[in-house]
Amino acid sequence: MVKKRKETENSGEFFTIEQIKSRREELNTELGFDFQWGDDPDLEVVSLPLGIHSLDEAMNGGIPFSRFTIFWGDQAAGKTTLALLFIAAAQREGLACAFIDVEKKLDPSWAKAIGVDIENLIIARPRTAEKCLEVLVELSKRNFGVIVLDSIAAMATQAELEASSEKKFMGEQARITGDIFKRLNAENTMSAIIMIDQVREHLGITFGNPETMPGGRAVRFYPALIIRVRRGTYIEEGTGDNKAKIGYNLRVVVDKDQHGQPFKDAEVPFYFTGRIDQEAALFATALSLDVITQKGPYFYFGEEKVLGKAGFIDRIKEDAEFKSAIQSNIDSIKEVD
């Protein structure tokens, strides 16, 4: 029960839910501000899925529009590759995308192999962090579907570039990164903004995890989704001297998710041709949901019994009806959840 306050000159009755219900339209005019209400569809979180079930499941449906997502990890872990996969997914939906290549490492032929429509992708290579901010703001104002910044760690301010190599700029990168987040938070209403970051280590840390991200504390506070990208084991083919690495297991770990359960993870086989093994990813999802069960070396789907993981994945690839049945079971479980 609400405790009564002491009567004062400005005291009165509380504004009630009943008054809100009867005066919704009037309040915007009286208070001089265009309010939104909790049942406004514009407030719903809309995500861009990859179409890869295990990754989409870990990310609670994909990356969110009108919000920030961070991909961070070690070198060559697959951060840029994952960002390009999301660009390709957005382009398949007919959305314009942009890639801000601060590191100047984007390979158009590799992006094309992954599925990016490189001819219709805007690529910007701004010299300074201040120019990065300008480009990001202008693109977000035009409601681009996905905007990728690669990377936060590579950005340098105008002052840093013009100063001598001996001069130190403590906190300069954190300052400009905070400015970028604050400005974009005010301007961006639709775009899914992916920022890629690297791994650094705090010096002198004896206990706990010393790993951190460049860019100050803002890189952890502002994003709705933070994904740690890791490279798993290599995928090899051949034997002996003819053995060659043809891919690796791309693993994502959700460090932060403001719209779903954090700390989920997923792993999918990724090949250096730019292809993700969809059937292997489907198998992993089905196994985690107990759609497929294992007893010894055998895997079961209903009455179907297949020897070995590789044999089961081959069966999925070769039998379209078998694959469809597994997918239907997964979808039905997700609908219940």
Image: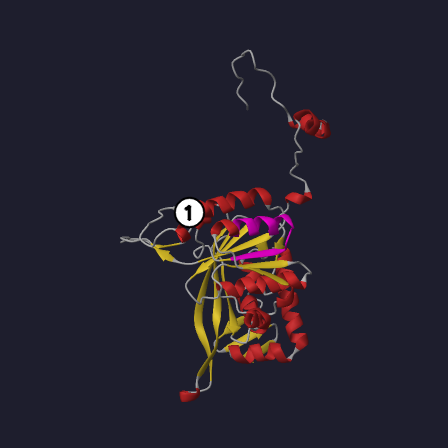
What's drawn in magenta, residue-wise? 132-149
The quarter of the displayed image where residue 25 is located? top right
Counting the numbered discs, the total is 1
- The image position of residue 62, as x and y in percent, is 58, 57
> In this rendering, does residue 315 appear at all?
yes
273 up-or-down from 166: above or below: below
Q: Quadrant of residue 93?
A: bottom right
- The reply to whether the magenta stretch includes residue 133 is yes
Q: Is residue 218 visible?
A: no
Left or right of 280: which side holds 213?
left
Is residue 183 or residue 169 the one in the foreground?
Answer: 169
Can you say whether 304 is above or below 11 in the image?
A: below
Mark 1 residue element:
helix
Residue position marked by numbered label 1 in the rendering: 174
Quadrant of the frame with the C terminus: bottom right
Nearer the observer, 268 or 80:
80
In the displayed structure, 56 sits above or below 314; it is above
